Amino acid sequence: MNNSGCEKDKKAGKIKYLLFAAGFSILIFTAICLWNKKADIKSNPASMMGTMVKKHLRHGTSEKQVPLKDVPEDFQAGDYEPNSKNDKHAVPDGTKTAYLSFDDGPSANNTPRILDILDNYKIKATFFLIGQHAQANKDLVEREWSSGDMVYNHTYDHNVDFIYKDPKNLVEDLNECDTILKSLLPGYDKKVCRFPGGSKNRPAVFKAAVAKAGYRYVDWNCLTRDAEVPNLSIDQQLGYIKQFSKNKKDLIVLMHDDSGETTTPDALPRIIDYLKSCGYAFKTIN
Ligand SMILES: [Zn+2]
């Protein structure tokens, strides 16, 4: 009787122990999962909205959403830095610099509005042009260049299905855009580009091919998300600027001046005012 009671106690003890061990394991597992998730979001705040889909069409083909995981938290090693004299993380004199950049233009409706605003503020920006759009808006390319803004290469067609099929296609498309820029701007010799959708997470062969062809490339570390959601309000764009500029001394701000991003010029004065109030000076990417 005593023995069987003892056995029962032992059994009950064993079960209790197993239940405790299982519960503890689940607790530890959950804690690890939560920790990883938190670390992921911290290292890449954009990952929180990774499933958003770009809705508008570009060049007749639906442009794949710039995967939000492609948004770099900061400049990537080996990427072109905006100012080689400055340490991107610790500028010795404490200067804060914002490099406003506009991709996918020029467009007849948005680019002149943006250029007018930049003129009003006496600020220069950097434009990454699509060759096809440059061809269709030659006067705007000339205006950008002659007003002291920087003009760089964003491929001829921005057709991500084509250019990311083969590194040769990407280089071919960059060269095509380069030829157009040279034909429009006498003496143009810049070899700087931005990968459509950014360079981060592109296979190394694409980056190697672009470098071998003589191009440096630059991404961004701050953005308004104007190309991801159509007609983002001024407050939404400003909200993203506040979010992504936090604790950064150098900002490369990604915006767009393609014809579809009509609320970008609406938000630009507020964005400039905000960055000025934070102490940023504005420069072109050189
Ligand atoms: Zn683009």
Image: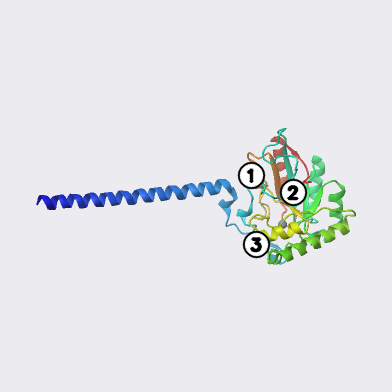
The earlier-in-sequence mark between 2 and 3 is: 3
Q: Which mark is residue 64?
A: 3
* Residue 1 % position (x, y): 9, 52
Most extreme residue toward the right is 186
Q: Residue at x 66, y 44 (%)?
A: 241
* Residue 273 % position (x, y): 72, 39
Q: Residues within 10 Å of mark 1 (few under 14, many from 20)?
A: many
In the image, residue 111 sits, relative to residue 206, either above or below, namely above
Q: Which of the two residues, 252 or 206, is positioned nearer the viewer here?
A: 206
Amino acid on which disc 1 is placed: Phe
* Residue 175 % position (x, y): 80, 61
Mark 2 sits on what residue? Answer: 101
Amino acid on which disc 2 is placed: Ser
The earlier-in-sequence mark between 2 and 1 is: 2
In the image, residue 65 sits, relative to residue 26, either above or below, namely below
Q: Is residue 259 visible?
A: no
Q: Secondary structure at mark 2?
A: strand
The earlier-in-sequence mark between 1 and 3 is: 3
Q: CA distance from mark 2 to mark 3?
A: 21 Å
Mark 1 sits on what residue? Answer: 244
Q: Give left or right: position of 50 versus 97.
A: left
